[in-house]
Amino acid sequence: MVIHPDIGSQLVNFCSALLLLTCFAIIAQRRLSACVDLFALQSVFLAVTAALVAFLTGAHHIYIAAALTVVIKAMILPRILKAVIERLNVTRELVLNINIPSSLLVCGALVILAFYITQPIISLGFLLTKDSLAIALAIVLIGFFTMIARKKAVTQVIGFLVIENGLFLGATAAAYGMPLIVELGVFFDVLVAGLIIGIYTHRLQDTFDSVDTTKLTALKE
Amino acid sequence: MIESVVITFVQAVVILAVSPFIVGLIRKVKARLQCRQGPGWLQPYYDLVKLFRKDVVASTHTSWIFTASPYIIFASTLAAVLLVPIFLSTVPLNFAGDVITVVYLLALGTFFLILAGLDAGSAFGGMGSSREAIVASLTEPAMILSIFAVGLTAGSTNLSTIVHKTALLQGIVTDPPPHLMALAALFIVTLAETGRVPVDNPATHLELTMIHEAMILEYSGRYLALVEWASAMKLLLFLTLISNIFAPWGIATEPEPVWMIFGVAVWLVKVSGLAVLIGVIESMFAKLRLFRVTDFLGLAFILSLLAIIFFYILRG
């Protein structure tokens, strides 16, 4: 079965737009477990996008990356994060550095910024996934912003993972994916980072009785 | 000419007849999800008939606004409905106004509902009115922008043109990301404008957090029936907007009787599906605190704004 390149390109755009949509949902959400669920959903959308690109381009190694995305980012990492949330007994972000309506406005501005930055690159591109590059950069920027705007360590981890999702989408969009060995390395890194940050969050809770990362700036014997 | 009059008339009758059914359908879905049998399918119709037979009780402190509002609300909602394509992609009245007219006809109804809530001078009415004013002022820009995002693709703000072009597959396939964002925004607007969970709870008269029910607390008899019927029509109008702007396929593009009957059937399936979805959402989510509602509606506004920006950026 062959799909017309235009329609294929639109399908990829559609899936990447879904990814961006979940980013906004994560920003608007205060409940930590819901944020984790949304991240898992975003990873599923990412896997669908990757599988779609694999199907359209015939680059079969992307299928493996898509499968790994589902297993690691949509199943294992959310489990770890949920376990952390359960043990720490924190359910929601109560005090935010930047409140939700302003965060949403900032993220809207970030999306526009991402589009203007990537516009010259996109107009020179010829890949059918080229439009997704802008969305990928927007997701990376929103992930950064989540890490800045939220205080709880768990939300910052989610921000970090969102950045990773954005980078993966960017690699898929700009170059039909990285070589498999690089992808494998990245997945392993993310998994280990997730584990380490989980342990670090526990230590934070033990030392400060809180997972508020601003406490780390205070001096303590 | 006569054909146009007949089609407009049929459209009005269909909306008036189907709107209580949709309200009943949402209640039935919620009841089933709570493992209850729920009231029968015809209950909303019985309620309306009962209310029309009852006498009206009005406080002596009320002015003409209290008496006139139910008629204005009902008439403005019905007028808005006639501008929205339901089973035929080009409504005969499309020369009378575009999507801006629809939005502001609905806003006129909301405005008089707010006035009526204030008019009786009860504490609850005033509270409900001030809350409704917050919600309405936040949903209006999101609603306008989300429909504009689709209008940009179709090259018109006229709902009939938008639906007609989309039904004939001119345009929608070229812009999925803006459409997706606009769809999400319009869905949030629908939940807020029609007083559904998580913004308002339509199932209670006893909460301090109620919005819509607080405003109509003073109404009884045929006035209450008119207000309830108008809000049912408004709900159906929003569901119709969502289904026909974003997925109008199946709608009749020519005024052929066979296709129009088919169009009604397809439309019924689509709006019923959306009604079931709303019932499920109402069962799954808790009502938001009033001060969190702005976050939720802010999301709708940002999404609709992004939809428009996406359009210009993807077009280069």
Image (cartoon, grey):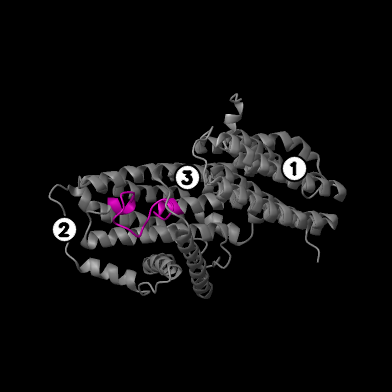
Q: Name the residue under label 1.
A: A167
Residue B308 x %, y %? 59, 43
Number of callouts in the render?
3
Q: State which region is magenta.
A: B191-215
Position of residue B304 in the picture relative to residue B13 (left or right): right
* Residue placed furthest toward the front: A221
Quadrant of image for the N terminus of chain A: bottom right
Q: Do the residues labelled 1 and 3 touch (CB within 8 Å)?
A: no
- Along the viewing direction, whichever of A48 and B194 lies nearer the viewer: A48
Which quarter of the image is occupied by the C terminus of chain A? top right
Does A218 lie within the magenta span? no
Dot 1, crowdedness within 10 Å: few (<14), some or many (≥20)? some
Residue drawn at x 78%, y 37% as measured from the top left: A121
Name the residue: 55% across, 53% down: B183
Q: Nearer the viewer, residue A57 or B143?
A: A57
- The kind of residue tagged 2 is Val
Residue ID for mark 3:
B297
Disc on the earlier residue, 2 or 3: 2
Q: Element under label 1? A: helix
Q: Which mark is residue B57?
A: 2
